[in-house]
Image (cartoon, helix red, strand yellow):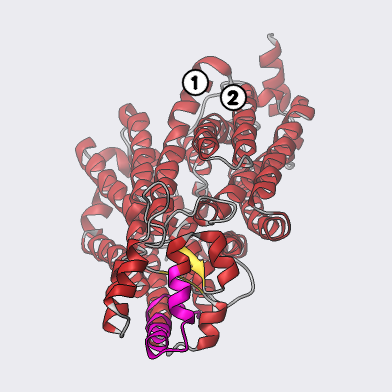
């Protein structure tokens, strides 16, 4: 008997009532890696926009880079998983990914734009090697047919969200006391803990490096946790032999519909690292930065996942659990409703009357739409032209879309002549023109702040929507896809996810539209897809019987 066979044989006779110790190793490995990953994501767009430690980018510029990064990150597991399968093996691939992650976060602690682009390249490569293969190792800890495997993926998924929850909190503290670059260095240290854990306890996960036969459910769980989606057990749906009675083409068309929904869902949902962070930073009335808002989704996932699993089981025992397409339609509806909550909060803020205290305490930005409103509000054309026309030494507009404060000492750190001219216009209170300028800026320059309730409540709703929609997708592919095309259609899910993340670039309009308009558009996009889903539920259920 070979050593591998002996290992598998001993594993199959192990106490099947207990999870192997290797699960704790992979839990910690993943938790610290996600701590590192979400530390960076919580800081990234605010860092790019910061004029002192960052680069003074506009929201549009930061959002564009963020969306490109996310698209590559969510596509990279396709390649990393293939390399591990055919060349490196799983544990070695995870270690390689960990070192690329360390390099990427370490590079972000260097205050140079070339370091940012090199860091993002390292992080994408690291994610490709790390994420799909650590997920594969979780399944490989268990013999085929083990009733503990589903629970293992749920436990592992909790590790993802524990890391995602604590990361922004730690980053808020470190950034406030030591700055952005020190915070990125802490993110790199998180990867040291992750890789160190896997290396030190490698003996407990050695057998998980073997290429075991994988069920469709395991393939779905591996793929789901590779993109931080809930594993299939959250959906509590069983496969059906009726699926084999449906022609392949109908099943493929049904999955293509699901892919279209996924694209829109991720476009809306992953505004969390860009426009929702800007909203939390600029327009939420709390004494922290937008960094902290990135913990809210993970908190709700930790709070809601197991109650939702229990609820599906409760309905299932009574024969009332909704079919998967119905759950996805409900999830898309909730996603849209969450942005209606934000729309309402933004409407309240935009319609409020601002005070001079808002100007003294608030941060704001000027763009072409605001400039037009400033002129309509009484600011002279000459003052508006000077503000909008100011350029730095490289010829870049230093005010248009750049965030800065009304306080002169802070503003001069952020920009140069453009901000100084704006501050001069605000503070020229000795003349009637100065008073009109101040009044115009007060009412038109994004100074409002609303209760954190709107953001926290919106995250509650969208997280519930995520848990009703996201875990269904890959499980659905594993059950519905014809066996001969399962690999291709699993890849289609990743491509759709990457496209959706690329489309988060819609956030470039955050500076151009009213926030209420932006949130309303995203709400309408999600609700439109929900209506489409409800309208085609009957043919979808026929193409996916038993799910």
How busy is the neighbourhood of tag 1: few (under 14 within 10 Å), some, or many (20 plus)? some
Between 230 and 353, the residue placed more toward the observer is 353
Q: Position of residue 275 (x, y in %)?
A: 43, 62
Work out which residue is located at the far top of the displayed protein and give it: 1
Residue at 62% from the left image edge and 37% from the top image edge: 146
Q: Is residue 282 visible?
A: yes
- Give residue 456's mark: none
Q: Position of residue 305 (x, y in %)?
A: 57, 60
Q: Are marks 1 and 2 in contact (CB under 8 Å)?
A: yes
Main secondary structure of the magenta stretch: helix
Query: Which secondary structure lies at badge 1?
Result: helix
Q: Is residue 448 visible?
A: no
Query: Which secondary structure lies at badge 2?
Result: helix
Between 410 and 358, the residue placed more toward the observer is 410
- Give residue 93's mark: 2
Residue 284 is one of the magenta-drawn residues: no
Q: Quadrant of residue 515?
A: bottom left
Residue 71 vs residue 117: left or right?
left
Residue at 43% from the left image edge and 72% from the top image edge: 422
Quadrant for the N terminus in the image: top right
**How many numbered markers are drawn?**
2
Q: Quadrant of residue 30?
A: top right
Residue range (magenta): 421-450
User: What distance separates the C-alpha of mark 1 from that of mark 2?
Assistant: 8 Å
Q: Position of residue 486 (x, y in %)?
A: 35, 32
Residue 271 vs residue 183: left or right?
left
Q: Which residue is mark 1?
A: 83
Between 52 and 540, the residue placed more toward the observer is 52
Q: Earlier in the sequence, mark 1 or mark 2?
A: 1
Residue 56 vs residue 323: left or right?
right
């Amino acid at each position: 008997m070979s050593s591998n066979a002996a290992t598998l044989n001993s594993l199959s006779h192990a106490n099947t009532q207990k999870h192997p110790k290797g699960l704790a190793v992979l839990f910690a490995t993943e938790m610290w890696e996600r701590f590192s990953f979400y530390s960076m994501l919580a800081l990234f767009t605010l860092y790019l926009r910061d004029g002192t430690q960052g680069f003074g980018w506009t929201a549009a510029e930061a959002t564009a880079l963020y969306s490109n990064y996310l698209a590559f990150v969510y596509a990279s597991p396709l390649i990393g998983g293939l390399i591990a399968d055919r060349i490196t093996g799983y544990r070695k691939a995870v270690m390689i990914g960990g070192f690329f992650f360390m390099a990427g976060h370490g590079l972000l602690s260097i205050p140079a734009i070339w370091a940012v682009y090199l860091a993002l390249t390292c992080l994408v490569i690291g994610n490709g090697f790390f994420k799909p293969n650590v997920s594969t190792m979780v399944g490989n800890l268990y013999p085929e047919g083990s009733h503990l495997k589903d629970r293992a993926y749920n436990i592992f998924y909790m590790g993802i969200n524990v890391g995602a929850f604590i990361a922004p909190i730690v980053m808020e503290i470190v950034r406030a006391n030591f700055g952005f670059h020190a915070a990125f260095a802490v993110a790199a240290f998180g990867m040291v803990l992750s890789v160190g854990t896997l290396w030190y306890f490698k003996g407990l996960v050695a057998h998980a490096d073997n290429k075991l036969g994988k069920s469709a459910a395991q393939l779905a769980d591996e793929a789901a946790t590779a993109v931080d989606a809930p594993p299939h057990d959250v959906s509590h749906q069983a496969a059906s032999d009726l699926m084999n009675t449906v022609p392949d083409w109908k099943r493929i068309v049904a999955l293509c519909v699901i892919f279209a929904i996924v694209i829109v869902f991720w476009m809306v949902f992953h505004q969390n690292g860009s426009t929702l962070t800007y909203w939390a930073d600029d327009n939420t009335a709390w004494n922290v930065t937008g960094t902290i808002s990135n913990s809210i989704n993970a908190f709700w996932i930790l709070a809601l996942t197991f109650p939702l699993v229990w609820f599906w089981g409760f309905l299932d025992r009574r024969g009332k659990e909704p079919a998967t397409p119905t759950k996805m339609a409900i999830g898309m509806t909730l996603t849209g409703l969450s942005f209606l909550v934000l729309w309402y909060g933004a409407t309240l803020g935009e319609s409020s009357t601002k005070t001079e205290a808002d100007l003294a305490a608030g941060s704001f930005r000027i763009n072409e739409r605001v400039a037009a409103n400033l002129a309509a509000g009484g600011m002279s054309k000459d003052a508006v032209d000077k503000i909008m026309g100011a350029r730095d030494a490289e010829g870049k507009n230093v005010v248009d879309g750049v965030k800065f404060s009304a306080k002169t000492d802070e503003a001069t750190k952020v920009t140069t002549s453009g901000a100084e001219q704006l501050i001069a216009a605000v503070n020229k209170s000795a003349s009637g023109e100065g008073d009109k300028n101040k009044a115009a800026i007060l009412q038109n320059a994004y100074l409002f702040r609303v209760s954190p309730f709107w953001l926290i409540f919106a995250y509650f709703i969208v997280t519930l929507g995520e848990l009703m929609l996201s875990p269904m997708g890959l499980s659905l592919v594993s059950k519905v896809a014809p066996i001969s095309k399962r690999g291709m259609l699993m890849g289609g899910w990743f491509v759709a996810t990457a496209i959706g993340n690329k489309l988060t670039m819609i956030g470039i309009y955050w500076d151009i539209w009213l926030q209420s308009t932006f949130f309303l558009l995203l709400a309408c996009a999600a609700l439109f897809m929900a209506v489409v889903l409800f309208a085609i539920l009957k043919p979808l259920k026929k193409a996916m019987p038993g799910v």
